[in-house]
Each structure stands twice: as C-alpha cells, then as structure tokens.
Image (spheres, rainbow, N blue to C red):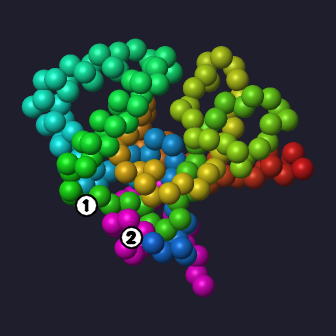
Amino acid sequence: DIMVYGFGTPCVGPIHAEPCSNKNIISVVGQGDPFSCLSLGHVGAVSHSIAELCENKELRSLALIRTDGRLDEADETDLRWCYETMKEIRSGFNGEKMYPPGRILYLFEQQQEDDNDNDYEQSQPQPQTNRKRGKAMRGCLREVPHTYFQDLRLQARMLDISRHVPSLYETMLQDMYRNLKESE
C-alpha cells in the first residue's frame, strides 16, 4: 500500500467519503491552521449562528451574560449552557462541511512543565501560552477525529501563513523526534 503524508492539508470532502475516510492518507494539521476547518459549509454554519444571535434578542443577552469573563473562570452551569446552546444552533444548520483527508495528526505546542516530562501520548491540545515567561515549549502530536474540525475556530495568528507552511511542520516533527530520542 502507498501511504501519503500531507502537511497543513485543507478541507477536501465530507466526513464519511473519500478521501476523508482513506486510512492511507495521513494529514498533519498544525495548531491554528485555518485551512483545516474552512469550507463553504463552515462559513455557512458561522453565518447561521450569527443570524441566530441577531434574530434572537433573548439568546444574545443570555450569551453575553453567561460568557462574560475568562473561560477558565466560567462555572459549570454556564459551560453546560454554552454547550447545549451550541448543540441546538448546530442542529439548525444542514449544510455539508468538508474535512481534511485520512487520519488526522494534530500538531501543537504545549508548555513544558519540566525537563523529564516526555509523555507525548498523554498530551492534550492546549492553547499556545506563556512564551514570554521563559517556559520552554515543546511540540506535541495527537491523532484527532474529523469532528475535531467541525467548527471554525478563530485563533491568534491563524492567518499568519508563515506558521502553516510544510517546512515548519517538518521542523517541528524533527525536533519532537530528536527530543524523544534524547530522552531514551
């Protein structure tokens, strides 16, 4: 069998059709990559959500009240409300979204807690933070399902194309491999 590796692969098809279902394709998608969750279906879903907020004054007011402040300071009831509301808004959209092809490996940076922490398998995708505090960042790789890209995510520097070129992905993967070999 031939294996195909793509770096920064864009949305190419529906979730249960070729090439998305092809296990001989490995898509390496970087943190904040706008192309992995940007299709006409994603744009339609955002448009639908904005229309819901514009047309429903009560929903708009509740959203502003319940999402006031930082996410890490939100209480469980507000987070549950946000989750249920997003689920309800999604159910009203019936456009078809496109997804990256094949198996998807999500490449992200995470703050390194200490020099002996090399457990890449247990890493969870986290927002990139704390570079200015002098903490070392490490590359992490995790296989994620296609549904990880069901929503258009707005992130800092997501449109900085220099962060989403194949050579950067290759460099990060080489650094991860070198660090892993050094830790053995």
Say if the magenta span includes residue 7. yes
Instruction: Say the numbered circle drawn on residue 128.
Output: none
Say if the magenta span includes residue 9. yes
Query: What is the C-alpha distance between the residues marked 1 and 2?
Result: 11 Å
Within 10 Å of disc 1 (Cα), the crowding (few <14, some 14-19, many 20+) is some
- Horizontal side of 172 relative to 158 (left or right) equals right
- Pick whichever, 85 or 117, lies toward us: 85
* Residue 105 in sight from this viewpoint: yes
Q: Position of residue 106 (x, y in %)?
A: 55, 51
x 20%, y 19%: residue = 61
Which residue position is annotated with label 2?
A: 16
Which residue position is annotated with label 1?
A: 96
- Horizontal side of 68 relative to 104 (left or right) equals left
Q: Give the range drawn in magenta.
A: 1-20
Q: Quadrant of the N terminus?
A: bottom right
Q: Main secondary structure of the magenta part?
A: loop
* Three-letter residue code for mark 1: Glu
Q: Where is residue 76 in the image (x, y as percent from the top left)?
A: 47, 25
- Whether residue 176 is situated above or below residue 25 in the rendered picture: above
Q: Position of residue 173 (x, y in %)?
A: 66, 52
Find numbered disc 2 in the image and state the secondary structure of the residue it sits on: loop
x 41%, y 73%: residue = 19
Which quarter of the figure has residue 81? top left
Which quarter of the figure has residue 9? bottom left
Residue at the far front: name it.
77
- Whether residue 57 is situated above or below residue 177 in the rendered picture: above
x 61%, y 18%: residue = 132
* Residue 167 in sight from this viewpoint: no
